[in-house]
Amino acid sequence: MFSLNKFLQLLTVIVLFIPAPSFGETGSIQGKVVYKTDKSRPWRYGRYYIKNSRTGLLAEAVVGLKDRKLATTNEKPQRFTIDQVDHMFTPETVALQVGDSVRFTNSDAALHSVKTNDPANAFSTTISKGQEHVHSFLWGGNFKPAVMECAYHGSMRAWVYVFNHPYFSLSKENGEFTMNNIPPGTYELLMHHPAGRLVWKKKITVTAGETINLTIEVSPENLIE
């Protein structure tokens, strides 16, 4: 008679011989975001997000994949910080995954608030100097960010992009972005720059074991009117 103990022993042997997924089974995308100027159509936000006008390397651009099949559980939630300093949200743009949280702080002497009317993440709170408020984002709009505002200072804005997968990146000051461990397949790759109102998209095919090197070039033609 086949006992339960023998069954469990056999199951253990089978599990031990199942190969673990290797990095070669996924692909990567890396590159940079560049803004091409047009003297006849000046972009007033360039001085805030482009450190070197000659290179045009663009900071705080959200780059990510769009595909329903990519949705996955966030196993290691992270916490980000957005400060309010000199009457500005710093940083202005954050990209995170469902389940992550943001710690909102106030370094100004002035009284600030943080509020968003995003249907899935709506909240409103007042923050005095030295205080903080932590909010967990439990639903993702992907490329539809939750817009943060201050009730007392109408010019203050921040954008929180909440993805239901980990295949996104926020460009650094040098314009660089990286996405790793992407399942092979054909996807739509998007770039949004919410403060500068820039959008870009392209179909892209990710191959196992390969890295796509890409330069995303945007110009006034990519502006949302």
Image (tube, rainbow, N blue to C red):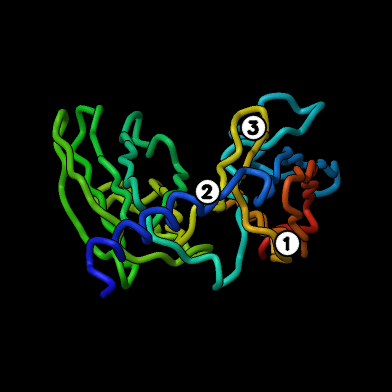
Q: Residues within 10 Å of mark 2 (few under 14, many from 20)?
A: few
Instruction: Find residue 64 and report its horizontal and vertical position in percent.
Output: 60, 54
User: Which residue position holds label 2?
Assistant: 20
| Amino acid marked by disc 3 | Arg
* Closer to us: 160 or 117: 160
In the drawing, does residue 167 fall left or right of residue 216?
left
* Closer to us: 172 or 17: 17
Quadrant of the drawing holding the N terminus? bottom left
| Amino acid marked by disc 2 | Ala
Secondary element under disc 1, as helix, strand or loop, is: strand
At horizontal 77% and vertical 65% (from top left) the residue drawn is 203
Q: Earlier in the sequence, mark 2 or mark 3?
A: 2
User: Which residue position holds label 1?
Assistant: 201
Position of 84 relative to 194 (above/below): above
Q: Earlier in the sequence, mark 1 or mark 2?
A: 2
Between marks 2 and 3, how big is the CA–CA gap?
48 Å
Secondary element under disc 2, as helix, strand or loop, is: loop
Q: Nearer the observer, disc 1 or disc 3?
A: 1
Q: Residues within 10 Å of mark 3 (few under 14, many from 20)?
A: few
Instruction: Find residue 48 and report its horizontal and vertical position in percent.
Output: 59, 33
Instruction: Find residue 158 and report its horizontal and vertical position in percent.
Output: 41, 48
Quadrant of the drawing holding the C terminus? bottom right
Between marks 1 and 2, how big is the CA–CA gap?
34 Å
Q: Which mark is residue 47?
A: 3
Q: Earlier in the sequence, mark 1 or mark 3?
A: 3
State the image quarter where residue 138 is shown.
Answer: bottom left
Mark 3 and mark 1 in contact (Cβ < 8 Å)?
no
